[in-house]
Amino acid sequence: MLADDRTFTLQIGLKNLLESTGVINVSPGQSTLPIHAPEAALAGLITVGPILLVFLFAQSFLTSGQLADAEKG
């Protein structure tokens, strides 16, 4: 739905980058960017990092919100 690649989210941009470099599908004629499996794994961790941090800080609020309606009374 995004027409311009400058407006992609990190996850979509990472997927497009990895598909175009041949890290996922090794086939002739791929890009010559020197991205290998360790760099791809690090990029994945970097894109998941902010989401994981928000979840860790909000975990107590999420748990208390779920348990608030479970009380009988």
Image (spheres, grey):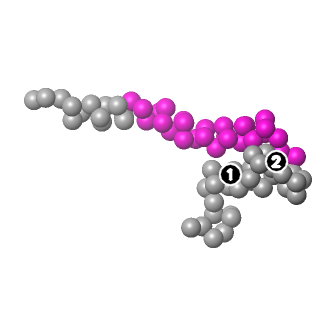
Q: Which residues are magenta?
A: 34-60
Q: Position of residue 46 (x, y in %)?
A: 67, 40
Q: Name which residue lies at 82% across and 47% down.
A: 26
57 w.r.t. 24: above or below: above
Q: Which mark is residue 26?
A: 2
Kindly indicate whether the residue at mark 2 contacts the one at mark 1 (C-beta within 8 angstroms).
Answer: no
Determine whether, in the image, residue 34 is placed left or right of residue 56.
right
The image shows residue 25 at horizontal and vertical percentages of 77, 48
Main SS of the magenta segment?
Answer: helix
- Circle 2: residue type: Val
For mark 1, give the secondary structure.
helix
Residue placed under numbered mark 1 in the picture: 15
Q: Is residue 51 above or below residue 28?
A: above
Q: Amino acid at mark 1?
A: Lys
Which residue shows up at 21% across the image and 31% down it? 70
Residue at 88%, 46% in the rendered image: 34
Q: Residue furthest front?
A: 27
Front residue of 53 and 28:
28
